[in-house]
Image: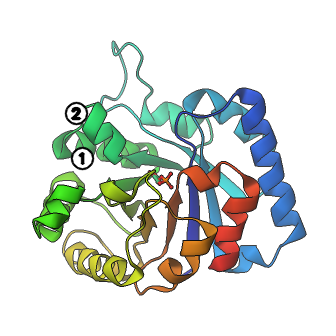
Amino acid sequence: MKKLIAGNWKMNGTLDDARVLIADILNGLHAQPELLKTCDFLVCPPFLHISAIRHAVYNSKDVVFGAQDCAAAENGAHTGEISAAMLRDSGCSHVILGHSERRQHQGETDALIRKKAERAHAAGLIAIICVGETADERAAGNEKKVVEAQIRGSLPAGASAANTVIAYEPVWAIGTGKTAMPADAEVMHGFIRELLSGQVENPENTRILYGGSMKPDSAKALLAAKNVDGGLIGGASLTAREFLAIAQAA
Ligand code: 13P
């Protein structure tokens, strides 16, 4: 399967920055079309920058775009929320759900993430469901238990390889410059693959991304690990050079 190279831009940059970044990515892919043979590309800008990205990728099949969250409710009186249907209507193909930053700072639970994933699927979006343990949980040897509970709790009925991507993002690796050792990532990704059978339709073809300080230097070994089907990239997705260098490493 092709690797999915996904950028989570988080809450960074101005509208102009977003326009420059997507133009640089598209130009970079134009210059290195061979990358498109091995990788699919996704960018997830902040909500307010989605329409600019839509405009920039109009007529290009090289990069798809998505959002970083959606509402659990379908529509109605939910001030400040953005629905899955609105994202689809704005051209999004994907939505990141249950990122550890939202689990930590917005108190998102597995049950809430599952509801959001149901909405995403109903709207025709691919849900990227994030899981991962904290440093303390790993130190206590509980990383598999934690990830298993997150997978069981946040995947909705009807999840399939076509509408769901899992992102394994160990919390201790996010934004810290520390990555999982490729061997540890391989163990966890293999474990997640096992968990997916019975939970999703077509588990072998369900993409499992690695996230957490993935950089051009660390990407090669991580992306070569068994069951690592791509990367969900934060910091290094904010420059086209680093983002595309990760794809080269794949
Ligand atoms: P960093 O690549 O900045 O560690 O972020 C990873 C991440 O959280 C992607 O969702």
Q: How crowded is mark 2: few (under 14 residues within 10 Å), some or many (20 or more)?
A: few
Q: Is residue 144 above or below residue 118?
A: below
In-front residue for pair 235/50: 235
| Image quarter of residue 111 | top left
Is the residue under label 2 in contact with that under label 1 (CB below 8 Å)? no
Q: In this view, does 83 lie to the left or right of 148?
A: right
Residue 188 visible, this orientation: yes
Question: Could you say where residue 179 lies in the image, as x and y percent from the top left?
Answer: 42, 67
* Residue drawn 83% across the image and 62% down it: 28
**Residue underneath mark 2:** 107
Figure quadrant of the C terminus:
bottom right
Question: Could you say where residue 50 lies in the image, as x and y percent from the top left?
Answer: 64, 35
* Residue drawn 59% across the image and 34% down it: 12
**Residue underneath mark 1:** 114
* Residue drawn 27% across the image and 41% down it: 103
| Image quarter of residue 244 | bottom right
In-front residue for pair 11/91: 11
| Image quarter of residue 248 | bottom right
Camera-near label (1 vs 2) is 2
In-front residue for pair 244/83: 244
